Amino acid sequence: MYNILIVDDEPLICRGLASLLENSGLNIQNIYTAHNGYEALDYLKMETIDLLITDIQMGAMSGIELMQQAKIIKPWVQVIVISAHETFQYAQLAMRLGAKDYLIKPINSEQLLNTVRHVLLHMDRPLQDQADMISDLREHFRMEQPHPERTEILNQLLSEDPSGSSSAITYGLEQANQIVLRGPYFAMIKIRIDLDSSSKGIKVEEKDAKLLQYAVLNIVNELLDKEWNHYSFYSESRDVSIIVQWDEAGYGDSSVDNINQLEMIGRSLHFHIHRFLGFQCVVGISQILKGREFLPELNVQVNKAIVWNREHKDHHVFFFGDFKWGLFTEDPTDEDLAAQNNLIVEKANEYIHSNYAQKGLTLNEVAQKNHVSPNYLSYLFKKNTGTNLWEYVIKLRMEESKRLIQNTDLRRYEISERVGYESPEHFSKIFKKYFGISPSEMKK
């Protein structure tokens, strides 16, 4: 059974789409509706949402911004975009953020149902037993390394001085249209599969490790090939490396947060590898640097980021920029690391207490103010406090609204405004879910 969230600033469209899906016979448990992006984010944070159907233009927060925030919270949420505008830029951004379809209003009912059906069926695909999966890999895939010459050149670029021979060789391959690394902006992602983390306790032989590396490479290409300018290839120790590049126009797009998109990719890769292969992996993400000569530095960064899994065994996606490397002249001690992490959580807590009643407060904003990624901040906050960060924001809002209900004569819409909600109706839904009774019942 699946939960679907429909987001549109026109209530009539929300009701129409909800009714269509309720009567479709599809395997749907709950259908939630929201009339703006901020309401939608509350549902995404509080409910298990499998499919998001969102409009593009919705006032304060666009559908593109909602998708970006949704993918920060849960990168695996499936998305279908609906729009009154047949704009290529919107469609391109939506597909890059992982939208499964981009439908133009007025919505064709059959087309929407077919798209929803396809998305749910894909999500419902049964997972293969690990032993069977490895057996299939042995049977159907050859052991040869894909694109061995290209793999060798790319690894040389990551390890050698840019003035060395690899640059000349790469130039020759560029001329042959095999490798095109023009950037000028580059980042790296590296995936290290943990062969000892099999959910079934399967011992992986050396030849099967190569097959799993091949399977990881295929997952990478399936997720990234359509919308990302990238090269994925084998690297040392059974790792899979990814070079992502942007041209000036793509990197400078003000509607896109490139670091958040890299983290979205990293978390999606981790989720899909664990889901379909049954093994854990660690994903390292570099910063973004301008110039191909910095590829060796990006490789150093992803390797350093991956090492942090030793300190955080229960966390799997690491961004190099989250760690204050410049504070230490030598490897930090456990006490240094703990102090750094405690300071991040302390400052985030202070910011939340000062701004929890702000309309439109997002995890991304709290993270930016504390110079850390949303992914790592969420992890640290939960680890240090035992509470999910957004649940903590809601707790502060609800306790303040309870105090205002019990001690003032403010109306519901006034209280809603004071604790950061866009509409009294949405505030009442959150309040009842939190306390079990409505604001008016509590007032009595």
Image (cartoon, rainbow, N blue to C red):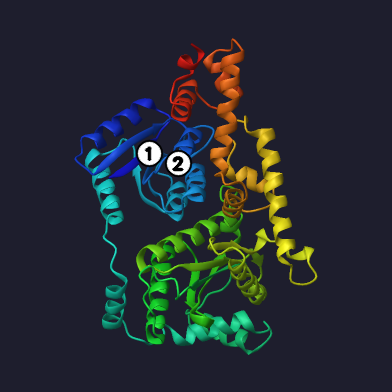
Amino acid type of the residue tagged 2 in the rendering: Leu
How packed is label 2: few (under 14 Cα within 10 Å), some, or many (20 or more)?
Answer: many
Amino acid type of the residue tagged 1 in the rendering: Leu
Image height check: is 221 above or below 105? below
Residue at the far right in the pictured view: 329
Which residue shows up at 65% across the image and 77% down it?
A: 296
Residue 31, horizontal then vertical, whole percent: 33, 36
Residue 101, horizontal then vertical, whole percent: 35, 49
Q: Is residue 213 left or right of residue 443?
A: left
Q: Are marks 2 and 1 in contact (CB under 8 Å)?
A: yes
Residue 62, horizontal then vertical, whole percent: 50, 39
Foreground disc of the pair 2, 1: 2
Q: Which quadrant of the figure contains the N terminus?
A: top left
How packed is label 1: few (under 14 Cα within 10 Å), some, or many (20 or more)?
Answer: many
Which residue shows up at 52% across the image and 68% down it?
A: 282
Query: To which residue does mark 1 refer?
Result: 5
Query: To which residue does mark 2 refer?
Result: 44
Q: Is residue 218 left or right of residue 338?
A: left
Image height check: is 240 above or below 15? below
